[in-house]
Amino acid sequence: MRRGAGWMIIVVLWFAGVDVAWAHGAPRAPYEGPWWLAWNWSQPVVVVNLSVLCMLYAAGLCRLWQRSGVGRSVSKKQAGSFAMGMLVLWMALISPIDVYSDELAWMHMIQHMLLLGVVAPLLVMGSPFFVAMWALPLAWRRRYGDWQRWVQLWKPARYLLWQPLMLWCLFGLTMWVWHLPPLYEATLYDDLFHDFQHFTFVLVGCLFWRVLLDPVSRLRLGRGMAVLYLFLTSLHATLLGVFMTLAPKVWYPFYESRAPRWKLSALEDQQIAGLIMWMPACMVYAGVAAVLLWMGLREDEDKKGQRGTAPLDRNCSAGE
């Protein structure tokens, strides 16, 4: 692993403490108030961990910029990506999105898509672990360096954490398994299990996007392979969305008592969730693939332009 690979540990530490005291084994009661007040403040550990992660990143960023200059070791774009990722993560876990995910399957689907397709890539581009480590004492950073060198010598770990085919399979497996009715329904009855689901989404999502977007790793897919990687991933979301949309019966009976409050049948609610998985979610992967392809074409054109103007420049120099 390179130095940027360790951002995963921050995610693990954050989710490890989430909502242990709030695991009831029973679903939350339906929310009755106005939607703009439907903030989930009943999980203080989430708020505390979000705040700690932001403070560690800010402290590490300040120390890095004091040593090397603003925007040098960590660019302003990277810091902005982290800030946006944390904002979306906050919205997904604390805002009305989380409260209404217990009311409507399609709102729950939006929450999942934000974690997998928005939060994960933004966090990867922000290099949170590399930055946050600089907020820690020097002795801790040296221990991490020793641990990292040890991991680099253990080739299976380095291979498994980067191998694109394995990560593609892991990403698809995570998406499919967590939407199987027994597991999906279990998350609605147990807050701790639900938090574990969110943890796996963020962790696997970050692993998936790392081979495409990690700014401090030399191990990144080329443009062509990246486009193929994203296109094949969109097939996961497409197939799952199609099956959910066209299913003749309700997959998640939990919503049969909740969706009618919103003038929807449980099956209609499920169909909307399937369409969200089918269309907008796939557009995320297709959009990133299109940007990468466009960037690759621009680079090729620039190289051709430089080769085409080089003889003319030499002739002009000789003439002078």
Image (tube, rainbow, N blue to C red):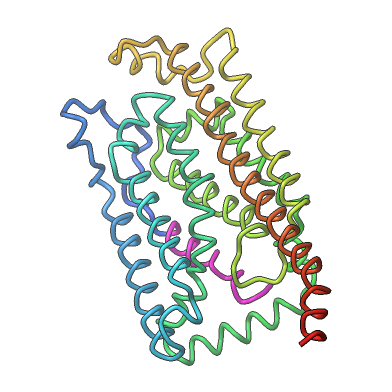
- Report the magenta stretch's main SS: helix
Residue 289: x and y, percent?
Answer: 65, 45
To which quarter of the image does residue 146 belong?
A: bottom right
- Quarter of the image for residue 266 reads top left
The span shown in magenta is 1-16
Residue located 34% across and 25% down the image: 103
Q: Nearer the viewer, residue 76 or 134?
A: 76
Q: Residue at x 49, y 65 (%)?
A: 126
Q: Would you identify the image quadrant in which residue 179 lies?
A: top right
* Residue 292 drawn above or below residue 262: below
In the depicted structure, whether residue 97 falls above or below residue 192 = above
Whether residue 273 is situated above or below residue 150 in the rendered picture: above
Task: Tell me the residue at 34%/38% (across/down).
Answer: 98
- The front one of 21 and 117 is 117
The percent coordinates of residue 100 (x first, y second) are 32, 30
Which quarter of the image is occupied by the C terminus? Answer: bottom right
